[in-house]
Amino acid sequence: MAILLVNGSPHRDGETKRALRIVEEALIGDGCETVWVELGTGPVRGCVCCLRCTETARCAFDDDIANDLIDAMAAADGVVMGAPTYFGSINGAFAAVLDRVFYAGSRHRRLFDGIPAAGVAVAHRAGSLSALDRLNHYFTYAGMPVVSGIYWSSLLHGADDRFGPKILTELGHRMARASAR
């Protein structure tokens, strides 16, 4: 089973990556392989509603990670997306990419139907629930069963978060079980 881990942070080795690595440890412990896609700091485009994707299931813009992410998601047995929380939701660059990915891959071709998905939000103080909600909107739009943990799957940074790692570990175990079905 190959589980796709998507780091939606511009910081390749930041707190979002740390949170996803906790999930990854549980996945590997349960016999899963992992594949990574990283947002990084390259420029991304927003959707311009050209509707080309309705014919091809690919975004007309091929100069950022959107089409690579579509391909990786369609090939995965499960998807875990991690997002930093900026201004009470996921960061804008990640949202711009996900708008295009989910419209192109879901609206007409249903490429992601049935693939289990989970979101992980990283926050300094607050906003992680709004970020998780935004990620879950993408998943449910695409017909992807949402895998939940034992609590909301978020990690606080800059604080003594005693529960976050336990929650993310359990999320990894549950994703492994969900993707095996």
Image: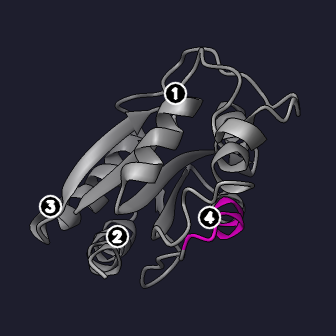
Q: Is residue 150 visible?
A: yes
Mark 4 vs 3: CB contact within 8 A: no
The residue at which mark 3 appears reads as 28
How far across and how far down the image is residue 92, in percent? 72, 35
Please tell me in which quadrant of the rendered image residue 78 appears: bottom left
Q: Nearer the viewer, residue 181 or 120?
A: 181
Amino acid type at image mark 2: Arg
- For residue 138: magenta? yes
Q: Which tag is nearer the camera, tag 4 or tag 2?
A: 4
Label 1 to label 2: alpha-carbon separation: 25 Å
Label 4 to label 3: alpha-carbon separation: 23 Å
The residue at which mark 2 appears reads as 162
Of marks 1 and 4, which one's residue comes earlier in the chain? Answer: 1
Of marks 4 and 3, which one's residue comes earlier in the chain? Answer: 3
Amino acid type at image mark 3: Ile
Q: Nearer the viewer, residue 72 or 82?
A: 72
Of marks 2 and 3, which one's residue comes earlier in the chain? Answer: 3
Which residue shows up at 70% across the image and 41% down it? Answer: 95
Which residue shows up at 48% across the image and 50% down it? Answer: 82
Of marks 4 and 2, which one's residue comes earlier in the chain? Answer: 4
Does residue 157 lie above or below 7 as drawn? Answer: below
How far across and how far down the image is residue 35, in percent? 28, 44
- SS majority, magenta: helix
Q: Which residues are magenta?
A: 136-144
Q: Which tag is nearer the camera, tag 2 or tag 3?
A: 3
Label 4 to label 2: alpha-carbon separation: 28 Å
Label 3 to label 1: alpha-carbon separation: 25 Å
The residue at which mark 1 appears reads as 10
Amino acid type at image mark 4: Phe
Q: Which tag is nearer the camera, tag 4 or tag 3?
A: 4
